[in-house]
Amino acid sequence: MSDATQGRAGGLLTSTIALKIAMAVSGAAFAGFVLFHMVGNLQIFSGQEAYNDYAAFLQGLGGLLWVARIGLLALIGIHVASAVTLWSRNRAARPEEYRRTETLRTSTSARLMLETGLIVVFFVVYHLLHFTVGAVHPEHYGVLDPLGRPDIFGNLVRSFQDPLIAGAYIVGNVALASHLSHALTSMFSTLGLAVGRFRRPAELVGPTFAIVVLVGNLSMPIACLLGIVQVEVTTP
Ligand code: HEM
């Protein structure tokens, strides 16, 4: 192999590792957001006033909220761009599909990373159009609570009482849990942390985290569908 070819191959390997690290770190940061977001949203079980207090607190962060929103967008951008680059490099290096044997030792969530990742991206866009922009299901958006604040609680509950909307959230969150389950475990391997006695615990982090987030996030649409959480007070 010539020096030039060797240099190119070395550069490609370094940039592949850099892309994998970028994907792991942006994914882990987004997973952190998902956990905090879920804990905050569980306020829905404390009722309209408590939930709208929490939403008003977030809105009151003003500039800081925008820094967080732009940071989140950047994380999603970095994560998706590295995933697409790695995926197309992988395909270019292996134009013919491997036969059956390749997938035998991989889990379902590992095999469905591309599909679940795409569903999560669609879900996040739909979710932002729903709650942040109010462009979809506008009939639930922009209503005020008895204290004159945006009734985000009322929007959530009325939305989730519609089986189609609740169903979309259930599908999005199942895809997210499957994606996170493999992603977090594989992140430890990428960062070289799943070795020796840390290998087994590292393998459990992804599935455990995914189940916690799945149960927390599904509890909300399901509780509204079943009438366990209801809108208490509406503005005249
Ligand atoms: C049942 C589960 C969920 C509920 C009830 C929920 C609820 C909400 C609400 C009400 C908002 C708007 C907050 C506001 O404008 O004051 C919001 C924003 C947001 N959610 Fe969710 N969410 C859920 C799951 C998720 C998941 C799984 C993700 C990511 C994969 C996510 C990502 C976001 C993002 C990025 C924002 C924008 C933050 C902002 O604009 O301030 N959410 N969510």
Image: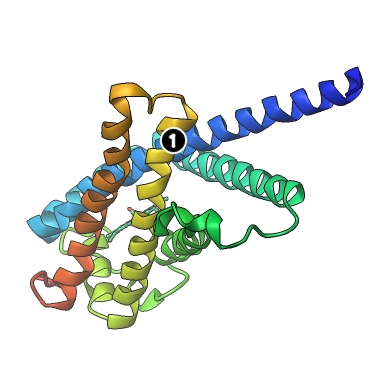
Which residue is drawn at the image coordinates 31% and 69% (left, top)?
A: 170
The picture places residue 119, in percent across and down from the top left corner, at: 48, 64
- Residue 16, position as x, y percentages in the image: 66, 33
- Measuring 50% from the left and 64% from the top, which residue is drawn there? 122
Q: Residue at x 27, y 68 (%)?
A: 155
Q: Residue at x 27, y 44 (%)?
A: 209
Give residue 162's quadrant in the image: bottom left
- Read off the residue under disc 1: 187
List x then y, in percent, for residue 108: 41, 59
User: Looking at the picture, how far across and down is residue 195, in whole percent?
Assistant: 38, 24
- Residue 236 seen anywhere in this rendered image of the structure: no
Q: Secondary structure at mark 1?
A: helix
Ligand 1 sits in quadrant: bottom left
- Does residue 206 lie above or below 152 as drawn? above
Q: Is residue 116 left or right of residue 207?
A: right
Q: Is residue 223 above or below residue 184?
A: below
Closer-to-camera residue (165/177): 177
The foreground one among 128 and 5 is: 5
Asked whether, in this view, residue 209 is left or right of residue 76, the answer is left
Query: Does residue 43 appear anywhere in the picture?
Result: yes
Q: How is the image coloured?
A: rainbow
The answer to which image quadrant residue 151 occupies is bottom left
**The N terminus lies in quadrant:** top right
Q: Nearer the viewer, residue 97 or 4?
A: 97
* Count of residue discs: 1
Rendered position, 38 above or below 218 = above
Q: Nearer the viewer, residue 34 or 2?
A: 2
